[in-house]
Amino acid sequence: MTRWKSARVILIWAALALAIGVPIAAAAASEQLAWRGPVYIFAGFAGIVALALVLVQPLLIGGYLPGLSAYRGRRAHHWIGGALALAIVIHVAGLWITSPPDMIDALTFSSPTPFSPFGVIAMWAIFIVALLAALRRRLGLRPRTWRFVHVPLAIVIVAGSVVHCLLIEGTMETISKAALCALVLAATVKVMIDLQVWRKRRTLRGESIARQ
Amino acid sequence: MTIVVLNRRNLLVAGGSVLATGMLAAGVPGLLLPARADGLAPTESMSGGANNYRKGAAIVDRIGKGGFWMSGTVRRAGDGAPLAGQRIQIWAHTVEGQEHEPQSHGATLTDKDGKFRLEMPQIIPIFGQPHGHLAYDSGEFKTVFLRPVMRSAKETSLEAHFVLQPA
């Protein structure tokens, strides 16, 4: 029992490491990197890391990562949310330095590339969630209100990020990219179903019961 | 009561079809025969086409070491006559440099058939799409910026066509 339990812990963490590590390693082996400057490369990898963090978020809040208590999972979810916002800032700033007119087109929704608006919408959703999360206590947002705001924005972030990423022709290798995107979608759908996010809940206790 | 409603509906339908017929009768010649029946519409600039443009790139035999072909045609709006001797500027993110760098830019002139063709380094994906940039910006005709996208990053040629209107 204990042996199976620890094997399960190792397996889950190893699977997560592979899910994130393989696409990053494949991108690091891309021949495209030879033709790019360091800032552009850094900006691109910030985007890949951001997508990986979008995978970690539902796993943390759903309590699927063994060895983390519900409390620590939630704390990690907060910090990784902040890291996600930071990764997006690096992604956008790096691309802006690489080609200002292309970045301005993207941010003003006048870009010829079909994936840009998806990325920009996901970016704003991430910033809004991060800002509200930081001010949550000060604004006195109740758990129900918070959930009502966060869940739709989380869906926008996931859908926007996945479409943005899949439509880009860049350093990411196609199959590992598609697999990471599929995992992001699967984790999001699972956490939404498990936590029954569409149901109204009155008390925090109700929430913690649903988390079991 | 029901009959009245039906009558109103019938009236509306009948009135609508009369209106539609009238509009069609007036509209069809307009649809079939736009302002210029034999007119070739001018090319509009593409969004993002002017990004990283450097005015006045020199006319060159080849950009960098070459290996990739950018080609196309330049014609006059309306009658579609080929325009000879027109200067087309070309730039892209290639294996030899980024879009904004001077060595990534060059220009060429159209031949007597309005065709142009310039060898340049292999274009690679930048900002998520393998694409090139072309500009007509010489004053005689209205400025046009194009941004054609390659179907695959492995392609070794790309085409873009200009239909220019007087400035």
Image (cartoon, grey):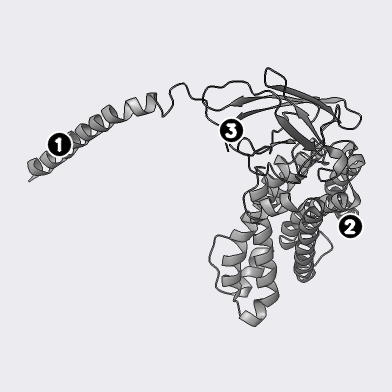
Locate residue A77, reporting x and y percent: 76, 65
Type of residue at label 3?
Answer: Thr
Q: Circle 1 marks a residue in which chain?
A: B
The reply, left or right, for residue B10 in relation to residue A49 is left
Nearer the observer, A169 or A204: A169
Decide: marks 1, 3 in contact (CB < 8 A)?
A: no
The span from disc 2 to disc 3 (Cα, nearest Å) is 71 Å
The span from disc 1 to disc 3 (Cα, nearest Å) is 47 Å
Which comes sooner in the sequence, label 1 or label 3? 1
1 or 3: mark nearer the eye:
3
Locate residue B23, reporting x and y percent: 27, 33
Q: Are marks 2 and 3 on the same chain?
A: no
Q: Secondary structure at mark 2?
A: helix
The residue located at (31%, 30%) in the rendering is B27
Q: Is residue B34 above or below residue A49?
A: above
Locate residue A156, reporting x and y percent: 62, 55
Callout 1 environment at 10 Å: few (<14), some (14 to 19), or many (20+)? few
Q: How many marks?
A: 3
Q: Secondary structure at mark 1?
A: helix
The residue located at (68%, 65%) in the rendering is A127
Q: Which residue is mark 2?
A: A2
Q: Is residue B110 above or below residue B130?
A: above
Q: Which residue is mark 3?
A: B43
- Dividing the picture into quadrants, the one containing residue A104 is bottom right
Residue that lies at the very extreme toward the front in this rendered image: B140
Locate residue B96, reporting x and y percent: 90, 37
The residue located at (65%, 66%) in the rendering is A128
Q: Circle 2 marks a residue in which chain?
A: A
The label on residue B10 is: 1
